Image: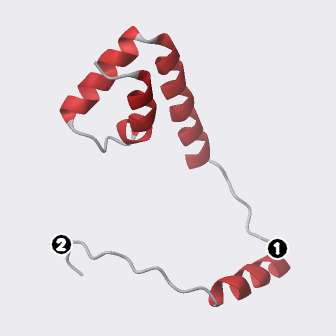
Amino acid sequence: MLTCHEVTELANDHLDREISVGSRLQIELHLVLCPPCRVFVRQIAGTIELVRHAEVPPPDPETERQLLSAFRGQPQPVMPSRAGSRK
């Protein structure tokens, strides 16, 4: 069975369904048997839901100008190509 530490490390991937079915089942079993981890995962899920639906107001024009100015001097990250993706 997974440890509490392992469950907390995998919580986001579990909620995003980015782990294997086997790992998902191991986490679900752990959550059935471990109330503290169950609370932790519920809190993470609640936080994700709040952030997903949060309305973020646009920055005021001066803040936007400062941000754009600051980022213009930064190197752009190189995005990895996705094998098999179509453009």
Residue type marked 1 = Asp
Q: Name the residue under label 2.
A: 83
Q: Is mark 2 on a helix, strand or loop?
A: loop
- Residue occupying image coordinates x 57% and y 28%: 43
Is the residue marked by circle 2 packed among few (<14), some (14-19), or many (20+) residues within 10 Å? few
Apparent side of residue 75 relative to residue 32 in the rendered image (left or right): right
Apparent side of residue 29 relative to residue 53 in the rendered image (left or right): left
Q: Quadrant of the N terminus?
A: top left
Q: Mark 1 points at which residue?
A: 60
- Residue occupying image coordinates x 32% and y 25%: 27
Q: Work out whether 36 lies above or below 73.
A: above
Residue 6, percent from left and from top:
38, 30
- 68 or 9, which is in the foreground? 9
Q: Work out whether 3 lies above or below 12.
A: above
Is the residue marked by circle 1 packed among few (<14), some (14-19), or many (20+) residues within 10 Å? few
Q: Is the image coloured rainbow, by chain, by secondary structure, or in one colour?
A: secondary structure
Residue 58, percent from left and from top:
73, 68
Picture quarter containing residue 32? top left
Residue 60, percent from left and from top:
82, 73
- 64 or 3, which is in the foreground? 3
Apparent side of residue 87 relative to residue 52 in the rendered image (left or right): left
- 62 or 13, which is in the foreground? 13
